[in-house]
Image (spheres, helix red, strand yellow):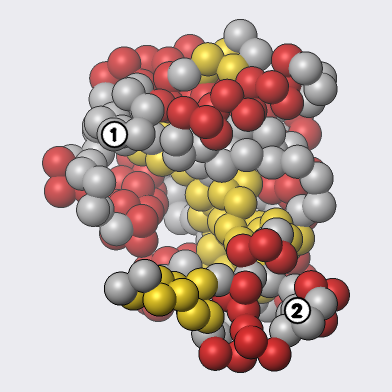
Amino acid sequence: MKDGKRILAVVPARSGSKGIPDKNMQPLGGRSLIARAAELLRSTDCSWIDRAIISTDSASYADEAKRHGLDAPFRRPPEFSHDKAGAVETMIHAMTEAETHFGERFDVVLIVEPTCPLRRAEDIARAVDLLLASGAESVVTVSRADTKFHPHKLLRMADDQLGFYDPAGAAVKARQSLEPLFFRNGACYALTRACLLDRQAVFTDNTRGLLIERDLVNIDEPIDLEFARFLVEQKGLA
C-alpha cells in the first residue's frame, strides 16, 4: 500500500510468441524473464505492493510464476491470449479476476512486462509515486529516442525516389536542433483504477512520462535477447 492506495501488480505473459518461441521463459542471468519480474515484485524493495499476479494462458508459465512468488489466481482466456488482443482489455480482465479472487478492491494497477528484465524496484516505485503525487491518470516509463530515428530524419522511398517522411526534415541542419522524443521502454505502466476501468485506456490527456536514463532492453526479437545477455554477462547489469 502507498499513501492509503491498494496496489495490484500484473505480469502479462501470454504464450505463443512468434519472434522468440517461449519468450517469457527465456533465461537471462540464470533466471527466466518471468522469474526476474516475479522476484523483483516480491522483493523487500517492493513490499508496498499488495498483490502481484501473473496473467497467462499457460500452465507452465503460471507454475514458473508461482515458484518465484507470484499468485496465479486465474488462467487468461483465449480471447485475451492471441497476438492481436488489446492490452487494456487484458488488464481489465486481470484486475476484475484478481478482485474477485482476493475479495479486495485495488486503486492502482501496475503493468510489469517480463520483456523489460533490467528494470529496478526504484523504477516501479517512482512511477507510482509520480502517479499519486501528480494526480495523473497514468504514468508510463520512457527512454530517450536516438536522434537517428527522429521523424524529421526518416525517409520514404517510392519508385526508387527518396524523400523526407516529414517535409520539415529538409530544414534540419543539426541533430541538436531536433525536439527530444521518447519511446516506451516497458519498465512499468502505472494506472489508476478509473483510468483502466472507466477510461479504458493507458494513454489519456492526463498521462505523465517517467524518464529512465540508463541501459534498458525491451525484448521483442532474438537480437534484443542477445543484447540483454550481453549487458548482464559482460557489463554486469542485474
Residue lying at 42% horizontally and 67% vertically, measured from the top left:
196
List x then y, in percent, for residue 170: 64, 87
User: In the displayed structure, does residue 38 sit left or right of residue 180?
Assistant: left
Q: Which residue occupies the extreme front position in the image? A: 160
Along the line of sight, the residue nearer the viewer: 137 or 113: 113
Residue 227 vertical placement versus 163 (above, below): above
What is the spatial separation of the Cα atoms under label 2 and label 1, in whole angstroms?
35 Å
Q: Which mark is residue 18?
A: 1
How far across and how far down the image is residue 40, in percent? 66, 29
Instruction: Tell me: residue 171, above or below residue 12.
Output: below
Residue at left 34%, top 22%? 22
- 14 on left or right of 136: left
Closer to the N terminus: mark 2 or mark 1?
A: 1
Q: Residue at x 55, y 71 (%)?
A: 154
Report the label total: 2
Tell me the element at label 2.
loop
Q: Position of residue 224 (x, y in %)?
A: 55, 34
**Residue with the mark numbered 2:** 178
Q: In this view of the protein, can residue 198 be seen by the observer?
A: yes
At label 1, the amino acid type is Lys
Query: Foreground: 37 or 22?
Result: 22
Q: Residues within 10 Å of mark 2 (few under 14, many from 20)?
A: some
Query: Which residue sits at x=70%, y=90%?
Result: 171
The C terminus: image quadrant: top right
Residue type highlighted by circle 2: Leu
The image quadrant of residue 68 is top right
Few, some or many residues within 10 Å of mark 1 (<14, 14–19, 20+): few
Left or right: residue 34 compared with residue 176: left
Q: Which mark is residue 79?
A: none
- Decide if residue 5 is in sight here: no
Give the quarter of the image for residue 137. Answer: bottom right
